[in-house]
Image (tube, helix red, strand yellow):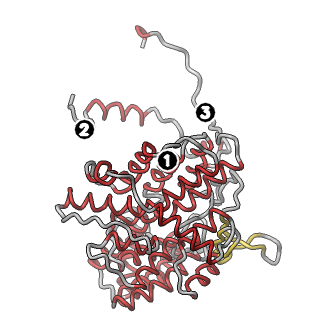
Amino acid sequence: MSSNFSDLTPYLHRLAARSDANNGIEPAMYNEHNVKRGLRDQNGVGVVAGLTEVSNIVTKERGPDGTPQPCHGRLYYRGYDVRDLVEGFSSAGRFGFEETVYLLLFSKLPTAQELADFSAQLSHYRSLPPSFVRDMILKASGKDMMNMLSRSVLALYAYDDHPDDISTPNVLRQCLQLIAQFPLLAVYGYHSYEHYHNNRSLVIHFPKPELSAAENLLYLLRDNGEFTALEAQLLDLALVLHAEHGGGNNSTFTTHVVTSSGTDTYSAISAALGSLKGPRHGGANVKVTKMFEDMKQSVDTSDEGSIKDYLVDLLDRSAFDGAGLIYGMGHAVYSMSDPRAEILKVWAKKLAEEKGMQEEFALYETVARLAPEVIGEKRKLFKGVSPNIDFYSGLVYGMLGLPHELYTPIFAVSRIAGWSAHRMEEIQNSGKIIRPAYACVKDEQDYINMEDR
């Protein structure tokens, strides 16, 4: 047997085949046992598993006859419409991520002085322990940025004098440190990967205390440390829009589940990172970008008919990755519109104009207009399909020159804010371990002695 632990030997293939053959759970059995598969009912509505004050997603309103009717999506952070929050900080010409983190954690909008003090505290925490970059990131480079990020978070446990203290003040301190450190962990992990696996020169910048989270991320990432004001604004906006999205999304629910066991902050956040890494959750914007790259190589993108044919081929599994999906279209919750996508689209157009990429933006707009029509015709869907935030965030990240490897880690740089708010809420209000039930559908068996098997 090979000494390489990653080898799939014939023996392992035989065991796997045996496991597949013995799996007797059929899809119809979920209905038979009244199990909400994926914790969602047949209409896709999530099973209510808890209470939260952190955020709210509105996708339906009462119609004239009193029945719920789909509406344009709205997203609220601590009761505030995210559209109003974005309008508030953008019209005043300030960055919004730090303000959003404050709101999510403390359930109030900060005053100017409170925001200044809070930003200074985050800046104070925006560093890593001595030799951490050398010993934990550069000396043990990996090929997946999310795994490196998760490993780094777990390693920080060893540098904490009170890692298992789950009192509110200590957990708040840990969460603020991780929020401040995530841009460093993500970017340094990427630089390590580029250096050791792609033979790129290694450039490590130290963060600047006067810069915001978005500005520091661009400064740390780029060799020359330069960026435009609009670039920083767009990245900051993306961080705000990804910061939180209800307690039921997979990574946030993971945070609740793991937190409810009483474990430490580093373990809970690492578990959330593992969830976000999954392609069904955090990797969709990379798929959008690669889908458009394939489209531009496959068809004449100046011809709407060719674009529509390509979209049909996507659904027929004969184009791109054969998954049968138009990536970036549709959402598990939103139907008529994703408010985050609508906000980001407006600002993406501004960045496209600055970058001279109007044709690229126009292509995205064309697909956004044609795709719902194609999906409706092919899939006979009438609930409504619209672009989600991943549709435009991939475009924005591409225009910012961000590498694909960092798309999901940047999602984590943002979503750590929501995870932290939900971890605090779970600690303060639950007091019970989350333990749902599973219905066992395997018949009881009589034991067979070894010589009779």
User: What residue type is disc 2 on?
Assistant: Asp
Horizontal arrangement in the rendering, residue 37 relative to residue 180 (left or right): right
Q: Which of marks 3 and 2 is nearer the N terminus?
A: 2
Nearer the observer, disc 1 or disc 3?
1
Calculate the distance from the C-alpha at mark 2 to the C-alpha at mark 1: 31 Å
Alpha carbon distance from label 3 to label 2? 33 Å
Residue drawn at 42 percent across, 14 percent down: 453
Q: Residue, x 41% and y 86% (percent of image)? A: 351
**Helix, strand or loop under label 2:** loop
Q: Residue 277, how many percent across, how many down?
A: 43, 55
Vertical position of residue 171 compared to residue 382: above or below = above
Q: Where does label 3 land, which residue?
A: 440
| Amino acid type at image mark 3 | Cys
Q: Position of residue 44 (x, y in %)?
A: 62, 59
Dot 3: few (<14), some (14–19), or many (≥20) neighbours within 10 Å? few
Q: Quadrant of residue 73?
A: bottom right
Location of mark 1 (residue): 266
Horizontal side of 55 relative to 148 (left or right) equals right
The total number of labels drawn is 3
State the residue position of label 2.
Answer: 7
Q: Circle 1: is it few (<14), some (14-19), or many (20+) Cα within 10 Å? A: many
Q: Do the residues labelled 3 and 2 touch (CB within 8 Å)?
A: no
Q: Nearer the viewer, residue 69 or 340?
A: 340
Badge 2, how many Cα within 10 Å: few under 14, some, many 20+?
few
Q: Is mark 1 on a helix, strand or loop?
A: helix
Q: Disc 1 and disc 3: Cα gap in Å?
A: 33 Å
